[in-house]
Amino acid sequence: MSPVVEMKNVQKNFGALQVLKGIDLTVDAGEVVAIIGQSGSGKSTALRCLDRLETIEGGELRVCGHALHDRKVDLARLRQDVGIVFQSYNLFPHMTAAENVMLALRLVKKKPFAEARTVAEAVLTRVGLADRMDMYPEQLSGGQQQRVAIARGLALAPKLMLFDEVTSALDPQLTTEVLKVIEQVARDGMTMVLVTHEMDFARKVANRVVYMHKGRVNVDGPASVLDAPPTAELADFLKSA
Ligand code: ADP
Ligand code: MG
């Protein structure tokens, strides 16, 4: 089976700034890969490239069989295969939790109302919000809103889920409830790439850890690299993390 993600020498610049200086990364089906690294090392940019929110200048990039280095990529089909969750939840304030989830199903998957509602109920139950479906974002805690955003991603039954520092705006208790949901989704077999600064979470949930340093992959190994860092750069980073 071909890998879910295949990055070969991927390069990305913002003007004169070289942000990704040749990234190689392969993710197989069922893998959970945690990307860690200092602020500004290119983690978010690398993740955004995987959903074609950024175009790349060089190299090859394939995600769920879509060749993203090709200008002719079918974005509508890519977005059905890849779900992404950000630090900010980006929910529509005038729509309930269920309506926020249903919107993606209606627009992206063209599902009829009743079917969309059934799927929304199922995924909101999966993230522990069975009793909050008809509430508006402002009636929910930050952790609950983030779980709605995760449910919205899951609703499309993607082949790959991307998470970018999804708990960094939350206090420790709400962080724990969101991480539990992500851990359960991982256990259910979802292929995931997550940018995180939660080292304990990475240790527990990730099969692989990728340490990015100044736009390059400095370490790519099992979660045990967090306990026995193979490079001086990762060792320094872990001391400060
Ligand atoms: P990280 O997620 O590891 O903190 P980012 O990928 O967000 O790093 O950013 C890497 C570098 O690219 C930083 O120097 C950042 O300022 C720069 N950068 C990110 N997005 C843009 C953009 N849209 N325009 C210009 N520079 C950007
Ligand atoms: Mg970032």
Image (cartoon, grey):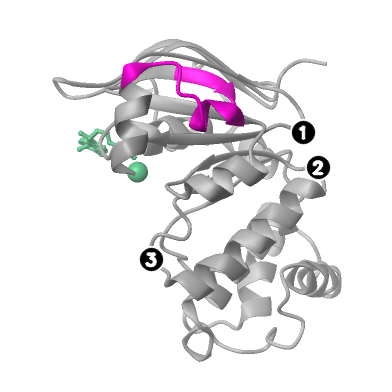
Q: Is residue 14 magenta?
A: no
Circle 3: is it few (<14), some (14-19), or many (20+) Cα within 10 Å? some
Tag 1: amino acid? Gly
User: In the image, is residue 98 above or below residue 184?
Assistant: below
Picture residue at 75% right of the left edge, 43% below the top: 190
The C terminus appears in which quarter of the rendering?
top left
Q: Which residue is mark 1?
A: 30
Mark sitting earlier along the chain (1/3)? 1
Mark 2 burial class by Cα count in 10 Å: few <14, some 14-19, many 20+: few
| Whole-percent x, y for residue 63 in the image | 62, 25
Write the start and end of the magenta stretch as one range.
219-232
The Cα–Cα distance between marks 2 and 1, rounded to whole angstroms, is 5 Å
Q: Is residue 222 left or right of residue 58?
A: right
Q: Are marks 2 and 1 in contact (CB under 8 Å)?
A: yes
Q: Tell me which amino acid carries mark 3.
A: Ala
Q: Quadrant of residue 5?
A: top right
Judging by the rendered image, the residue that carries numbered circle 3 is: 169
* Ligand 2 is within 8 Å of the C-beta of the residue at disc 2: no
User: Mark 2 or mark 1: which comes first in sequence?
Assistant: 1
Q: Secondary structure at mark 3?
A: loop
> Which quadrant does the N terminus fall into?
top right
Quarter assignment of residue 62: top right
Kindly identify which numbered label has been placed on residue 189.
2
